[in-house]
Image: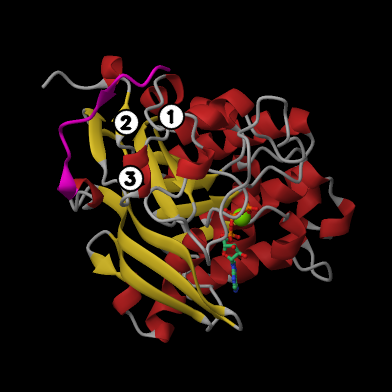
Amino acid sequence: MTVTARIREVAPPITAAPETESMALTVHDLVTEFRTRSGPLRAVDGVSFAVPRGGVLAVIGESGSGKSAMLRSIIGINPPSARIEGRVQLGHRDLLAMSPRERRRTRGREISMVFQDPLTALDPVYTVERQLTETIRKQDPGIGRGQAVARALELLELVQIPSAAARLKAYPSELSGGMRQRVVIAMAIAGRPSVILADEPTTALDVTVQARMMRLFREVQSEVGSGLVIVTHDLGVAAELADDVAVMYAGRLVEHGTADEVLTRPAHPYTEGLIEANVRPGQDRRPNAIPGAPPSLRRLPPGCAFAPRCRYAVADCWAGQPSAATVAGDHWSRCLLVPAAEREPS
Ligand SMILES: Nc1ncnc2c1ncn2[C@@H]1O[C@H](COP(=O)(O)OP(=O)(O)OP(=O)(O)O)[C@@H](O)[C@H]1O
Ligand SMILES: [Mg+2]
């Protein structure tokens, strides 16, 4: 990528995500600030995006960029030390404006989350049947026991667990990592939520199982019709499964667009660096990994937070935070400089 021109067209309303009824999830100007002993730490800083029903958004970015804090703010499970601002809409309802009780009721039924480690989501002392039927009955209190078991069985079949009936009677420790993650996915979809959040859902699994699991996740999600936000380190996963990709750096989204646009024609030098390094967990110091480290969120450099590591940085990059600029269509980047070839003709 050669940076040859300064973008002329700056599009201020880009951060305002479209708010149509077809959107499963609309996040607008989300801020998450943790109160810490050494002062406030802004882990999420003005993030906006929307995910349509049945759509998949992959969020990529190095460790510490705020991906988990963002998902936790959306579903409402950050600790009380977190101050959260902005709007998080399920359809047209604002989750952040709900009472804690109302909000809890949305979890599992309308929005659910899959974590990296399936063991944290499963209780070792209960069988799969007990855990699944409990989730089902919470979503649908009127359902009879027999019906709940039948639904649990259907869910295990949906996530392609072989000998599903026998697995219902198993304890989590009796299942392989892949099977456990399937159970967790089954629990996440049990209430047919309109939104599923997934925080690196396959990282704990064997590499060979990961791709299969992600495909299964996509199948199940599109069957239920949920919007899916998936945090992943694996750009291959993002390319294969996601409709859109958002790139997060130091608490901000720096680039957003269709997976194809962002991953094949990156317009932010950070995205370009991630693609070159193809960062995977445990391997993020490849020879061509991005030099340097992400900044401390307590001491962000003035201007573009990526400037100190950016091979294209010019003096203006330190002057102020770049606003989002259209690259093409819905593809935008928060970079003062974009390659001329990738600009929309003006
Ligand atoms: N409860 C908390 N209290 C204080 N700081 C927190 C808290 N949770 C997260 N942070 C800080 O917020 C920043 C973002 O963390 P987060 O876990 O969201 O990053 P991430 O992008 O998910 O990283 P990884 O890829 O390693 O999972 C980090 O600096 C982290 O230390
Ligand atoms: Mg994380």
Q: Which residues are magenta?
A: 1-13
Within the magenta stretch, is there residue 9? Answer: yes
* Extreme residue toward the left, this view: 346
Viewer-side residue, 130 vs 246: 246
Q: What kind of residue is marked 1? A: Tyr
* Extreme residue toward the right, this view: 174
Provide the major secondary structure of the magenta segment: loop
Q: Secondary structure at mark 3?
A: loop
Q: What kind of residue is marked 2? A: Leu
Query: Disc 2 marks which residue?
Result: 337
* 36 in relation to 154, above or below: below
Q: In the rendered image, which quarter contains the N terminus?
A: top left
Q: Secondary structure at mark 1?
A: loop
Query: Disc 1 marks which residue?
Result: 312
Viewer-side residue, 52 vs 253: 253
How far apart in space, not on screen, are marks 1 and 2 (Cα)? 8 Å
Whether tag 1 and tag 2 are in contact, CB under 8 A, the answer is: yes
Viewer-side residue, 314 vs 135: 314
The residue positioned 76% from the left and 31% from the top of the image is: 207
The tag earlier along the polypeptide, 3 or 1, is 3
| Residue 251 shows in this picture | yes
Name the quadrant where ligand 2 sits.
bottom right
Whether tag 2 and tag 3 are in contact, CB under 8 A, the answer is: no
Left or right: residue 341 versus residue 305 is: left
How far apart in space, not on screen, are marks 2 and 3 (Cα)? 33 Å
Residue 232, picture quadrant: top right
Query: Disc 3 marks which residue?
Result: 53
Pointer 3 residue Cβ closer than 8 Å to ligand 2: no
Pointer 2 residue Cβ closer than 8 Å to ligand 1: no
